Image (cartoon, helix red, strand yellow):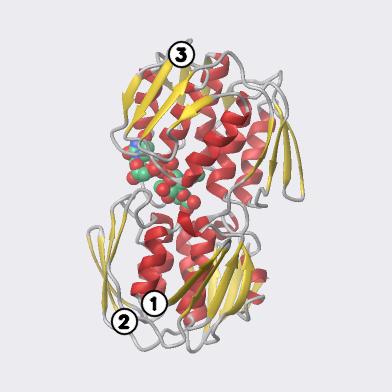
């Protein structure tokens, strides 16, 4: 088991390349199950979750070659439409194979993903949508067993769930006739998935809005596709720069995917500049408190909430943070308090009173974004050393984060426990 040691107090300065988006790559890989000719993905991030999805898909019979950041996937034949518990439980995005398997093969057996640290993570919205397309679904020994020739339908989601929107959209591309998905999630990763599926021959319109329309087709071919930049990774590095009163530029990012977040950085007193694919954030004169609410896109991304909280622990004033997307996503708060932060939790609201300084401490990562938050707090700490354990969480979503932070001047290293 590795741990990450951070000695803080140094402003981060410089530029860092943003990798391909984890939350685009995973559904794109699942979408390749629909292709009856090779699919080539470029700009694929080398992340633990991508390796897990690779293992799941290869286990189902897909042939995958992943060299550098290019992944070639072939699923013309020999696909077994089953996703076993031991793989799905390690990475809940595995559940995204349900829609494509059902759409293409008319049957699928996929383990229920179960909960995780940030919440129970039910899949009721996914299943209701697939049933609306005519699938018969039963739960058997912890598995979703689904079958049926799908027919297009109009269906409105109870909540704009990202995964449910993706699963239902991927099933609908092979359903007979027209499907309209109302109250759809609008995340850029959904638009990216629709772009790839349309290049494979699907007929999807409205992705990125709350009404997605799909006209089913007989079959989908192959394509080449470039994964969009990871907006959460971009936001994480920008926050690390601002939180350490430094000056960081992220390269190959897309500022349009971070509308509210960049406004909040400005409101906090950071200088934010956007030039094409480069976003620069600097805060040499410190940070003011700001309030924010996490919301489905284009609202403030829940995946940046923990990292923003870390930055605000040393802001001037009191910040109010409301987490409306997940029911238990403040786990980083207790660890930040151990580093000297002043945070009170009241239900889904966190009150963060700015303190003069943080001090390093041994802390425990609980989930991917909470661990990123602890790295940022470690970088901010004016004295002592922060030892972050269970760093496998962070490796799920960030490629060699410590090496890239060293490139920005951080005193951080990974050690074997
Ligand atoms: C995706 O998860 C992302 N993961 C998450 O990123 C992200 O936090 C989330 O969207 C919200 O933006 C991937 O794309 C692989 P949801 P997903 O369905 O699809 C409830 C990260 O750190 N819900 O939009 O699982 C659910 O419990 C990860 O990179 C139901 O109630 O999120 C949650 O409270 C974490 N029933 C809310 O909706 C359902 O059937 C949003 O979940 C589905 C969801």
Specify the label residue 338 is tagged with. Answer: 1
Residue tagged by mark 2?
354
Spatial CA distance of label 3 from label 1 is 53 Å
Spatial CA distance of label 3 from label 2 is 54 Å
Q: Quadrant of the N terminus?
A: bottom right
User: Looking at the rendering, which quadrant does residue 220 occupy?
Assistant: top right
Q: How many marks?
A: 3
**Quarter of the rendered structure image containing ligand 1:** top left
**In what element is the residue under mark 2?**
loop
Of residue 321 and residue 119, the one placed in the foreground of this image is 321
The residue that appears at 58% across and 49% down in the rendered structure is 228
Left or right: 188 as drawn, with respect to 322 = right
Q: Is mark 2 within 8 Å of ligand 1?
A: no
Specify the label residue 233 is tagged with. Answer: none
CA neighbours of label 2 inside 10 A, class few (<14), some (14 to 19), many (20+): many
Of residue 213 and residue 132, the one placed in the foreground of this image is 213
Q: Nearer the viewer, mark 3 or mark 2?
A: 3
């Amino acid at each position: 088991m590795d741990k990450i040691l951070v000695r803080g107090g140094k402003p981060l300065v410089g530029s860092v390349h943003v990798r391909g988006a984890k939350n685009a790559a995973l559904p794109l890989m699942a979408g390749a199950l629909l292709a009856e000719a090779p699919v080539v993905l470029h700009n694929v991030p080398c992340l633990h979750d991508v390796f897990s999805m690779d293992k799941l898909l290869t286990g189902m019979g897909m042939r995958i070659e992943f060299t550098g950041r290019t992944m070639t996937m072939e699923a013309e034949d020999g696909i077994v439409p089953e996703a076993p518990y031991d793989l799905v439980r390690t990475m809940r995005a595995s559940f995204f194979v349900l829609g494509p398997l059902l759409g293409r093969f008319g049957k699928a057996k996929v383990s229920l993903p179960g909960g995780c640290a940030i919440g129970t993570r039910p899949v009721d919205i996914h299943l209701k949508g697939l049933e609306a397309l005519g699938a018969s679904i039963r739960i058997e020994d912890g598995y979703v067993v689904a079958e049926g020739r799908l027919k297009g339908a109009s269906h409105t989601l109870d909540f704009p769930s990202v995964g449910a929107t993706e699963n239902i959209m991927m099933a609908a591309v092979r359903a007979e006739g027209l499907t309209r998905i109302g109250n759809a999630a609008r995340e850029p990763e959904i638009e990216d998935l629709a772009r790839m599926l349309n290049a494979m021959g699907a007929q999807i319109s409205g992705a990125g809005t709350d009404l997605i329309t799909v006209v089913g087709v007989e079959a989908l071919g192959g394509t080449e596709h470039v994964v969009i930049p990871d907006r959460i990774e971009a936001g994480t590095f920008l926050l690390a720069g601002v939180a350490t009163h430094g000056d960081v530029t992220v390269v190959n990012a897309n500022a349009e995917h971070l509308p509210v977040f960049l406004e909040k950085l400005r409101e906090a007193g950071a200088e934010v500049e956007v030039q094409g694919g480069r976003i620069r954030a600097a805060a040499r004169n410190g940070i003011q408190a700001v309030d924010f609410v996490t919301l489905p896109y284009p609202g403030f991304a829940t995946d940046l909430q923990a990292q923003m909280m870390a930055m605000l622990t040393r802001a001037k004033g009191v910040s109010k943070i409301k987490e409306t997307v997940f029911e238990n996503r403040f786990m980083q708060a207790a660890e930040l308090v151990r580093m000297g932060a002043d945070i009170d939790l009241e239900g889904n609201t966190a009150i963060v009173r700015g303190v003069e300084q943080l001090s390093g401490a041994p802390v425990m990562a609980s989930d991917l974004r909470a661990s990123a938050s602890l790295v940022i707090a470690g970088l901010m700490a004016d004295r002592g050393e922060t030892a972050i354990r269970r760093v496998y969480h962070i490796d799920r979503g960030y490629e060699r984060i410590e090496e890239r932070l060293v490139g920005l001047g951080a005193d951080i290293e990974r050690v074997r426990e």
